[in-house]
Image (tube, helix red, strand yellow):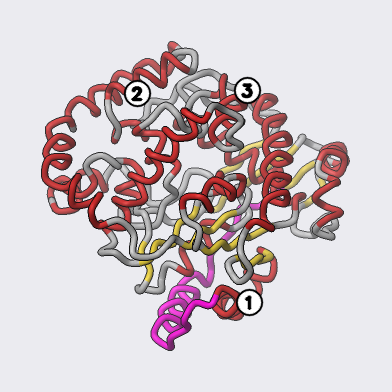
Amino acid sequence: IGGSQTGTGKKKQGKLSVHPYIGGTATNLCRNVLKNGGVAKNRMATFVITLAGTLLTFPIRLLEYLLYNKKVQDAGLAQDPIFIIGHWRSGTTHLHNVISQDKRLGYLSTLQAVFPTCSILLNKSRLLKGLIEKLIPEKRMMDNVKMGIDYPQEEEFSVSCITSYSHHCNHFPRTIKQSFDKYVLFNTTDEEKAEWQHAYMSVIKKASFLAGGKRLLLKNPYNTARIEVLLKMFPNAKFIHIYRNPYNIYVSALHDFIKEAEEMALQEFSEQEFSELCYELYEKLMNRYWDTRDLIPAGNLCEVSFEEFENNPLGEVERIYTELGLEKTETAINEIRQYVDSLKGYKKNKYSYNAALMDKISEKWGFAIKKMNYTPPTDIALDNKADWSCSIDH
């Protein structure tokens, strides 16, 4: 069955769904709603269901706190994490899924991402875990990438669930720019930055506890602009930055923003708003990365081209391990090879855009295109029938 979306059609809004905030607290949910401009009428049902969910999990959250909070805090981290960073749609998820096949590494799971306050107890209950698993779609809404309750996930959702001093992803379109500036670029007060650091560390410590103390492999595009703060928290952290042709990024990221907002936005949004947001956030994210990457100690950063990784995943993984000083074992490489082999036949989204859009991308992101020495790709078709289009084969 083929699915498609174009840049001229009307976007679905007000879809009833279970919101990621369901795994947080009712207090935090309400605080975020008030802080970010309220809930649209056509998303009120989702808000009410989510609020009810947070209240239902209160006994589990309380019990987990009493039983495990001190153990989690005392356990800490044996080693600083390995951070996979890069702009959205640059291949961060693919890289994360590949390297996480190395069983010596741990990661934050989808279960913890959505239920950061009670993931330990939920993970121990087959019944509850099974019920939650039914809420998770088999594939991501924006592409054909598989999902599952035990699959790797990014920690931004967890942090958003437990504090209002965080970037709220696409949940509140009215304040995305302000939230990005304050809690990604950290153009905010020392107090708010400290609140974010406290929340983030609590999420990371629990992920480490759930992973049995293994070194964490974490993937989060927002962290691309947080290098300075992350190094203060984890001075010996390793970073893998994956980058991609900006011409491929734009249409894919816009489609991603829209599909996620259809499911998770608690406010109205328009394609035009997200279009301008794509241009602005890319510039801010990439420039902050280039401004701060030299802060990373020698031997702790590896940069990876998505195109090279796609063409030679095993070769690039071995290069990553070598450059970061990570031990390569035959077992780990074989586990990664088996996973890569299992992806054969995977069908990527197909995109097109018109000539005017290509010119605008060249204008807006010319600084990055020139810096990374990219040219218009051959895998995106020029089609003047619509601003852009995306087709997904399921």
Determine whether label 3 and label 2 are within 8 Å by CB.
no
Residue 78 or residue 1, whichever sits in front? 78
Q: Which residue was labeled with disc 2?
A: 29
Quick one: label 3, few (<14), some, or many (20+) residues within 10 Å?
A: few
- Name the secondary structure under disc 3: loop
Mark 3 or mark 2, which has the lower sequence index? Answer: 2
Instruction: Identify the secondary structure beneath mark 2.
Output: helix
Residue 312's label in the rendered image is 1
Residue positioned 40% across, 53% down in the render: 147
Q: Please give the count of numbered marks on the rendered protein.
A: 3
Q: Quadrant of residue 264?
A: top left
**In this view of the protein, can residue 383 be seen by the observer?**
yes
Residue 148, by quadrant, is bottom left
- For residue 2, say whether it is visible: no
Q: Which type of secondary structure does the marked residue at label 1 adopt?
A: loop
| Residue stretch rendered in magenta on the structure | 325-351
Q: What amino acid is found at the position of numbered circle 3 in the picture?
A: Ser
**Residue at left offset 30%, top offset 42%:** 116
Q: Residues within 10 Å of mark 1 (few under 14, many from 20)?
A: few
Q: Amino acid at mark 1?
A: Asn
Residue at 30 percent of width and 56 percent of height: 76
Which residue position holds label 3? 270
- Residue 322: give x, y in percent of width and height: 57, 80
Q: CA distance from mark 2 to mark 1?
A: 43 Å
- Foreground mark, 3 or 2, reads 2
